[in-house]
Image (tube, rainbow, N blue to C red):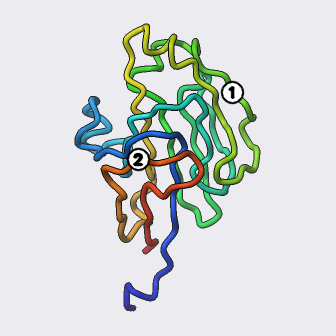
Amino acid sequence: MFGFFKKKFNIVAPVDGKVIELSKVPDEVFAQKLAGDGVGIDSISDIITAPADGKLTLIFNTNHAFAMTLDNGVEILVHIGIDTVELKGEGFERLVETGSRVNSGEPIIKINRQLIKKRGYSLVTLVLIANMDVIDKIDYNLDTQVKSGKNIVFNYKIK
């Protein structure tokens, strides 16, 4: 009916850093929103947390990314760094297991920033909605400094 009656849902920062537009992310798949829509965070901390409450549906074997299904059915992907899959898990430590119910701000992955940066990889972390077909609107909180588990990086409304 009227869009202003729809509830807004918040996604909080999974890592400390500066929120950037996807178009500015140094990877074409993410920049062109082929993996979903959301934001990048030019990260400055070592712990990656859940950006919302939900079920941890997948942690990649290399621990460089994880997916969550939220209670409202929205699917979130958090991808740590650019091309970091090439590290084959080195520099990433899993803190919880796939299938776990997690709360916003709960630690999921610990990274070794120095090792990853030394190997030449960007640590821009992506926070994406993978099933955009259920989304009506996203409002981004761009060009702001955020704290993991505290500040909103974007909010959205479901169709």
In-front residue for pair 78/47: 47
Residue 130 in the image: state x and y as whole percent: 45, 50
Q: Is residue 74 above or below residue 29?
A: below
Which quarter of the picture shows residue 141?
bottom left
Labels 1, 2: front one: 2
Residue found at x 62% / y 46% = 50
Give the vertical position of 1 relative to 138 (above or below).
Answer: below
At 45% from the left and 52% from the top, the residue drawn is: 129
For the C terminus, the quadrant is bottom left
Q: Which mark is residue 58?
A: none
Count neighbours of disc 2 (C-alpha within 10 A) and say few if under 14, some if 14 to 19, many if 20 or more: some
Residue 145 - label = 2
78 displayed left or right of 106: left
Asked if disc 1 and disc 2 are in contact, CB closer than 8 Å, the reply is no
Residue extending furthest toward the top: 119
Left or right of 64 in this view: 134: left
- Image coordinates for residue 46, horizontal then vertical, percent: 57, 28
User: Seen in the image, is 25 located left or right of residue 113?
Assistant: left
Q: Mark 1 and mark 2: span between their CA atoms?
A: 25 Å
Instruction: Check residue 94 in the rendering and tell me which mark sits there, or answer none.
Output: 1
**Residue 92 sits above or below residue 97 on the image:** above
3 and 108: which is toward the camera? 108
Secondary structure category for the residue under label 2: strand
Q: Amino acid at mark 1?
A: Arg
Q: Amino acid at mark 2?
A: Gln
| Residue visible at 29% across and 44% down in the picture | 22
Residue drawn at point x = 53 percent, y = 31 percent:
45
Choose top left, top right, bottom left or bottom right for residue 106: top right
Q: Find numbered disc 1 in the image and state the secondary structure of the residue it sits on.
A: strand
Q: Position of residue 79 (x, y in %)?
A: 48, 35
- List x then y, in percent, for residue 104: 65, 53
Q: Nearer the viewer, residue 132 or 124?
A: 124
